[in-house]
Image (cartoon, helix red, strand yellow):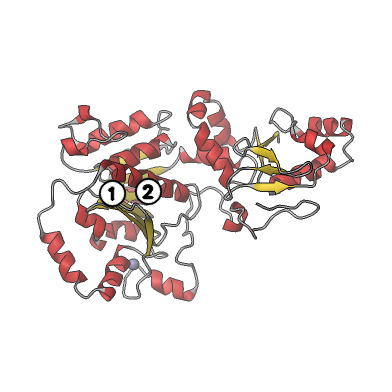
Amino acid sequence: MHPMMKPALRRGWRDRDTVQFGMTPAHALALGPMDPATRGFLDLLNGTRGLPLLREEGSRMNLPAGQVDTLLQRLARAGLVDDARGGGPAADTLREKPDVLRRLRPDLAALSLTTTEPGGALARLAARRALRVRVRGAGRVGAVLASVLSGAGVGEVDVRDMGCVEPWDVAPGGLPAESLGERRDTAARAAVRRAAPDRPPRHAHSPGSGARDRGLDLVILTPRDDVAVHAPDPAEAEPLMASGTPHLYAGVVEGTGVVGPLVLPGTSGCAGCLHLGRGDRDPAWPRLTAQWRCGRARPVGACDLTLATAVAGLAAAHALTFLDGQSPSSTGTRWEVSAPGMDWHARPVRPHPACGCGAAERGKKGEHSSTGGGPRATMAVQRPSTQRRRKAGAARPTGTWRAHV
Ligand SMILES: [Zn+2]
């Protein structure tokens, strides 16, 4: 262990004895009272010293015996300390790629805010390299989203679509103008490769379909067809439901951006639940969806570039939150934003008792909450949200330390 105060949090003194780490309410923490010797000792926590050397330095600074270990334990419990050499073998492998790590420095710093255990941030960043994600739909939203995930360090991002790149598919960060006329999926995969901070790790299997879905950590459905965004067809998701593959919906329909729901099959509300729930609230819903789906697809929908980019970015953030082992707010919820107000609304997709996915039944039995995380064998360490979020009232270290903000 080579302790290092997390550099992502800016430090400031609220008064002579109280130090505040971080500026924003989401992650800021104040600690004190702190004597001058302890204050000076904090400066030594920069990742260059191991524990034995730190104990020596501590006694040289007249800190009482055992104070160094107690201090480090408390700082670690508060989630303020990283381990410059921790994170396990995958993290060590990533450390050997300084160029890749430099590219991902802001991402690593962001992960350090949502992980408590020293070395946890780099462990999660390294774990992303082994993830396998598929994006279905390579329009303005899908191609950008796939590139963003790749750029954030997800090792394998496959893109599926049909047809060729049209002028209106072109978007910064997504399909380039040079790809006009190329196959959409080929062009999107090229964009994904360009965005990657590193060459993808080698995999034993090659791209395929069907049974391979079982091995995917997440599928993201970003249809170019606006009816599929507004009223996702449960039949489309059947193979994903059958294989238990988590999937996330995102897209733009008639000037409204949609992110969610993230579906954890059998646990949270799915496209079938959404369809049945809408039908309960609006008796005309089944008739309307049947007409919309039978109608000719519009080649060009109302999908302005800024909204498409915002949806791609937010959906990628929700996807990464899930892939990093936490529960994003899109689990069982559709977030919707409409021009020109651009304020986001949450629309719950509750498990429906008549849906064959079984989420409603399971929720009733109390096996899982509708917003809880499902079984995710590939995930990194998961911890209760109270340990991750330092909101007022959340669990905090006790003792002579007080914590507020
Ligand atoms: Zn369902």
> In the image, ligand 1 is in what quadrant?
bottom left
Q: As rendered, which of 130 and 100 lies closer to the eye?
A: 100
| Residue found at x 49% / y 62% | 372
Taking the image as shown, residue 149 lies to the left or right of residue 303, namely right
Q: Is residue 338 visible?
A: yes
Whole-number angstrom distance, CA of label 2 to CA of label 1: 10 Å
Q: Residue at x 56, y 35 (%)?
A: 91
The answer to whether residue 245 shows anywhere in this view is no
The spot of residue 90 in percent (x, y) is 55, 36
Q: Which residue is mark 2?
A: 315
Q: Helix or strand or loop: what does disc 2 sit on?
A: helix
Q: Is there CB contact under 8 Å for labels 2 and 1?
A: yes
Q: Nearer the viewer, residue 367 or 286?
A: 286
Q: Earlier in the sequence, mark 2 or mark 1?
A: 1
Check disc 1 and report the residue beneath it.
Answer: 222
Percent x, y for residue 313? 37, 43
- Image coordinates for residue 64, horizontal then vertical, percent: 89, 40
